[in-house]
Image (tube, rainbow, N blue to C red):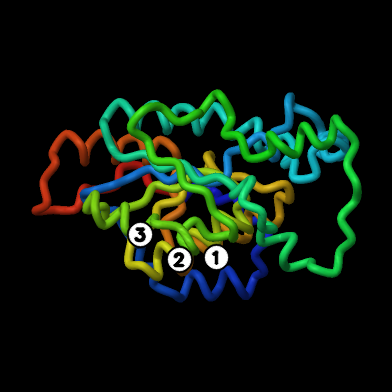
Amino acid sequence: MAERVWDRFLTEEDKAHLAASTHRPVNPGTRPALLLIDLYRGVFGEEPLPLIEGIKKWPGYCGMPAWNALPHIQTLLATAREVGIPVIHITGLAGAGMPGWSEAAKRDWVRQEFGPATTEREARRFEIMPQIAPIDGEVVLRKASPSAFWGTPLVGQLNFLDVDTLIVAGESTSGCVRASVVDGCTNRFRMQVVEECVFDRHFTAHAMNLFDLNQKYADVIALETALAYLRKVTSTRSDAATPELVGAR
């Protein structure tokens, strides 16, 4: 099997346990939707920069992992639109007069006064990147917590569409992606995380959260696997059988 992104972090005991265990994949169903989580300006900034440079203007900046993932996300989104599956964009809640989850958790933190430039960037923080911006017919939901499910009508929309499988892209792997995948599994959806299409500002957190998600709540699959699945499942549109994964890793 090809080396996985998390392999370098596993101990010898970890590897021995995995070798002795029987890992059962989730496997996708037959009615997928694409879930794009928090692909907004605040994590990309205006241009590709090293992490330490980018956070000077955008505190939530994720560095080059975000920019490296962007073309892969564009490919996944283009295929989802081509085959006609539902696409759901998730971003932060802005302008509602209430703090976000991070600010609420740090309620004793004294908020700094922003200058005009910082205020302007703050106002644009949750704008979805233009390269992957929603088009007519695609749902956009705003959340005030890490999970795309908490406090939003996401479950109702997915039930209305008769979705059984969520193809997941976005950020951060250790934060909002993880929270959304766990909640998706809790709500009995078949969660499929596309490895090249999720990212985190810290590589170790990215790798080990993918490992944990793959072990417990989801299949972590290659982009080529996701594309092949989408083309196959939408060409057959059969509820009689679950499509085979091709080239899964």
- Which residue, given by chain and number where applicable, does mark 3 sit on? 155
Q: Is residue 96 left or right of residue 202?
A: left
Query: Which of 215/20 is in front?
Result: 215
Assess disc 2: are there few (<14), some (14-19) or many (≥20) residues with their C-alpha within 10 Å of its C-alpha.
some
The image position of residue 106, as x and y in percent, is: 79, 66
Disc nearer the start of the sequence (1/3): 3
Identity of the residue drawn at 75% across and 40% down: 61
Identity of the residue drawn at 38% across and 43% down: 34
The image position of residue 37, as x and y in percent, is: 52, 46
Q: Is residue 62 left or right of residue 70?
A: right
Q: Secondary structure at mark 2?
A: helix
* Disc 2 from disc 1: Cα separation: 14 Å
Assess disc 3: are there few (<14), some (14-19) or many (≥20) residues with their C-alpha within 10 Å of its C-alpha.
some
Q: Secondary structure at mark 1?
A: helix
Q: Is residue 232 left or right of residue 40?
A: left
Residue 94 is labelled as: none
- Of marks 2 and 1, the one in the foreground: 2
- Amino acid bearing label 2: Asp
Disc nearer the start of the sequence (2/1): 2
Q: Secondary structure at mark 3?
A: helix
Identity of the residue drawn at 64% across and 46% down: 95
Which quadrant holds residue 121? top right
- Which residue, given by chain and number where applicable, does mark 1 sit on? 212
- Amino acid bearing label 3: Val
Q: Are marks 2 and 1 in contact (CB under 8 Å)?
A: no
* Disc 1 from disc 3: Cα separation: 24 Å
**Number of numbered discs present?**
3
The image position of residue 248, as x and y in percent, is: 38, 47
- The answer to whether residue 38 is above or below residue 28 is above
- Amino acid bearing label 1: Asp
* Disc 3 from disc 2: Cα separation: 10 Å
Query: Which of 118/185 is in front?
Result: 118
